Image: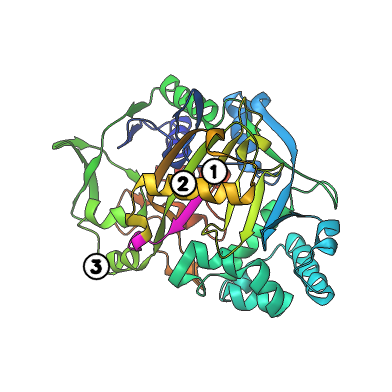
């Protein structure tokens, strides 16, 4: 989002400097060398409704790098991996009765065709889903996903936020039986390199390993930023760092704004990536409901983006205060190996070529009912100061397309 803000501001005639605390740009889209493969630390995929991303790819001249592939989903329950994600799979799914199947299918159908989310904003997601699909379908298909991602907040989620996730993926179907998802040749690196080059070509600056220690304010007006103990003068500042960092970075905010930021919740993630000698399955995404597997699902990324070896992501979302998050990376690697071998008993230890764990402290905002009203305005009551992170995508979830949409909107809203 920060890169999108910078790129659009340069096009609008501003002088721009991007300060990145990390050694690479991109945040959760940043890539690394994983056993000879340049790949994202956290998985990403593209859906057919992602128009802001398509517009950006075209303007950056890399639209021809967008690839589409037919993908499959699976559902693992009671030790068996079943096909999932289409009407025939639903009809054959043995863990639901006929009424539950009918109600679940109707809910998915209506959700993908709904366009208004405001009526769902104040509703709790679990109650909304149970009203549609019934208790049995909720317990089988949804509860484990909520519990293993949000823990204590599993029953305080916005129905609007859940609905957009259903709609986005459901809208990527190009027939009742088939879905397609997209990826970029070269992964997110292709996009990050293109937009970084565009920023520099337009006269912008990108400074890496440059953590903003403080946004400088005087007389309720932005004066600049402090980087590594040095003050730099700017007339306008746009922050796209995770909201939990904002209060420490901008200590002169009004108390009411600071309280609003403090009240926003986030959960962390430990994402384990595995390079294998054989597939776990033929699915891109597998939902899991099994008492012996502490994961809500896995993403077999190489079933979307063809790679030389199968690559699987296993994301463990949880509150950072949870004892599980305090465990070592090695413990997460061992746990993931065991889980994948349960999903596919043919996998042996020798099939694991490489494994890596990436952590992100503020990975997912917890969007409860009425979430929109809890967010402070992006344009804060400090002249020249704008603050947003992925919380402001609401009701949409985190995604590259939403990053570009909101980033460009913020850039176009700045005072001239």
Where is residue 196 drawn, in percent x and y? 45, 26
Please tell me whether mark 3 or mark 1 is closer to you in this view. Answer: 1
Residue of label 2: 271
Which residues lie in the magenta part? 315-323
| Quarter of the figure with residue 131 | bottom right
Where is residue 93 drawn, in percent x and y? 79, 63
Asked if residue 377 shows in the view, the reply is no
Q: Tell me how far mark 1 sits from mark 2, CA to CA.
A: 7 Å
In the rendered structure, are the residues bearing label 1 and label 2 in contact, judged by CB atoms less than 8 Å apart? yes
Q: Which of 130 and 397 lies nearest the eye of the viewer? A: 130
Where is residue 276 drawn, in percent x and y? 57, 34
In the rendered structure, are the residues bearing label 3 and label 1 in contact, judged by CB atoms less than 8 Å apart? no
Residue of label 1: 313
Please tell me whether mark 3 or mark 2 is closer to you in this view. Answer: 2
User: Vertical placement of 193 versus 213: above or below?
Assistant: above
Asked if residue 102 shows in the view, the reply is yes
Q: Residue furthest left?
A: 229
Residue of label 3: 255
Residue at 55% x, 70% y is 158
**Which secondary structure lies at badge 1?**
strand
Q: Tell me how far mark 3 sits from mark 2, CA to CA.
A: 35 Å
| Quarter of the figure with residue 23 | top left
Residue at 31% x, 43% y is 236
Q: Quadrant of the C terminus?
A: top left
**Which secondary structure lies at badge 2?**
strand
User: Vertical placement of 379 versus 70: above or below?
Assistant: below
- Nearest to N terminus: mark 3 or mark 1: 3
- Nearest to N terminus: mark 1 or mark 2: 2
Q: Residues within 10 Å of mark 2 (few under 14, many from 20)?
A: many
Q: Which of 50 and 47 lies nearest the eye of the viewer? A: 47
């Amino acid at each position: 989002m920060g890169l999108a803000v910078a790129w659009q501001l340069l096009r609008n005639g501003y002088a721009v400097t991007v300060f990145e605390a990390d050694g690479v740009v991109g945040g959760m889209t940043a890539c690394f060398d994983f056993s000879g493969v340049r790949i994202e630390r956290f998985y990403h995929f593209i859906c057919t409704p992602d128009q802001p991303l398509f517009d950006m790819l075209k303007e950056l001249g890399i639209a021809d790098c967008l690839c589409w592939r037919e993908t499959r989903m699976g559902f693992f329950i009671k030790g068996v991996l079943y096909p999932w994600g289409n009407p025939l799979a639903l009809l054959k799914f043995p863990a639901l009765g006929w009424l539950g199947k009918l109600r679940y299918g109707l809910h998915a159908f209506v959700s993908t065709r709904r366009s208004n989310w405001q009526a769902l904003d104040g509703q709790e997601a679990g109650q909304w889903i149970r009203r549609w699909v019934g208790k049995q379908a909720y317990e089988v298909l949804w509860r484990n996903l909520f519990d293993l991602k949000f823990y204590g907040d599993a029953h305080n989620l916005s129905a609007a936020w859940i609905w957009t996730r259903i709609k986005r993926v459901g809208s990527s179907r190009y027939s009742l039986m088939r879905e397609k998802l997209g990826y970029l040749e070269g992964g997110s690196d292709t996009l990050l390199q293109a937009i970084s080059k565009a920023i520099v070509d337009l006269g912008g600056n990108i400074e890496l390993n440059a953590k903003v220690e403080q946004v400088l304010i005087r007389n309720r007006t932005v004066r600049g930023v402090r980087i590594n103990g040095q003050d730099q003068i700017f007339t306008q500042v746009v922050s796209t760092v995770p909201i939990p960092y904002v209060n420490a970075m901008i200590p002169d905010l009004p108390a009411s704004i600071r309280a609003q930021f403090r009240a926003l919740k986030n959960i962390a993630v430990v994402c384990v990536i595995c390079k294998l000698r054989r597939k776990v399955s033929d699915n891109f995404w597998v939902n899991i409901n099994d008492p012996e597997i502490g994961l809500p699902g896995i993403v077999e990324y190489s079933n979307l983006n063809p790679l030389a070896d199968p690559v699987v992501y296993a994301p463990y979302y949880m509150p950072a205060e949870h004892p599980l998050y305090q465990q070592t990376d090695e413990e997460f690697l061992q746990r993931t190996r065991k889980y994948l071998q349960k999903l596919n008993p043919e996998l042996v230890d020798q099939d694991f070529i490489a494994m890596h764990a990436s952590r992100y402290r503020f990975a997912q905002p917890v969007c409860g009912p009425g979430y929109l009203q809890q967010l402070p305005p992006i344009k804060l009551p400090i002249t020249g100061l704008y603050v947003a992170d992925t919380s402001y995508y609401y009701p949409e979830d985190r995604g590259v397309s939403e990053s570009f949409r909101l980033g460009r909107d913020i850039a176009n809203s700045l005072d001239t």
